[in-house]
Amino acid sequence: VVALSDQYESEFSNRQNQVADFDNQLAQLKIQVEASKNELAVQYSALASEKRRLDGLLNSGDVSTYNQNVPAFNEQVKQYNASVKEADKLINSYNTIVEKRNS
């Protein structure tokens, strides 16, 4: 009975340590996810502003200037999409750890 109690206590302590480790990982990932979320908001705002400017150029008939600026805008969109993918990876990692922690 004593051996069984000791084994149970050891397993319980191991689980507590594992949960604490998961909690630390989650705390770090949460910081990264929030920073990524903030950066994405800044990038999105800049893209929206640039799109309005480009639309204004197109609507005013300044097609030449519009065409000159489109490649830079497309590069910004490409960078934004890459940032979204990185944020998704962080979120997926976070969710995986939550599942492990709660199992």
Image (tube, rainbow, N blue to C red):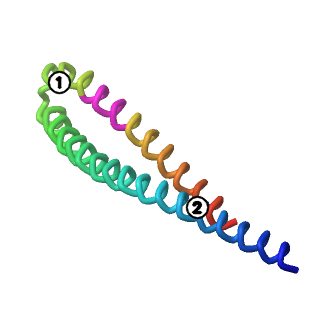
Identify the residue at image location x=34%, y=31%.
79
Q: Quadrant of residue 18?
A: bottom right
- Marker disc for residue 2: none
Residue in view at x 40 percent, y 34 percent: 82
Q: Position of residue 50 (x, y in %)?
A: 18, 38
The residue lying at 34 percent from left, 55 percent from top is 34
Furthest toward the right, the residue is 1
Quadrant of the frame with the N terminus:
bottom right
Mark 2 lies on residue: 98
Q: Secondary structure at mark 1?
A: helix
Residue 70 colored in magenta in the image: no
Disc on the earlier residue, 2 or 1: 1
For the residue marked with disc 1, what is the amino acid?
Val
Q: Which residues are magenta?
A: 73-80
Q: Horizontal and vertical percent for residue 42?
A: 23, 47
Q: Height in image: 51 above or below 33?
A: above
Q: Quadrant of the C terminus?
A: bottom right
Q: Secondary structure at mark 2?
A: helix
Residue farthest toward the bottom in the current orientation of the protein: 1
Q: Which residue is mark 1?
A: 63
At label 2, the amino acid type is: Val
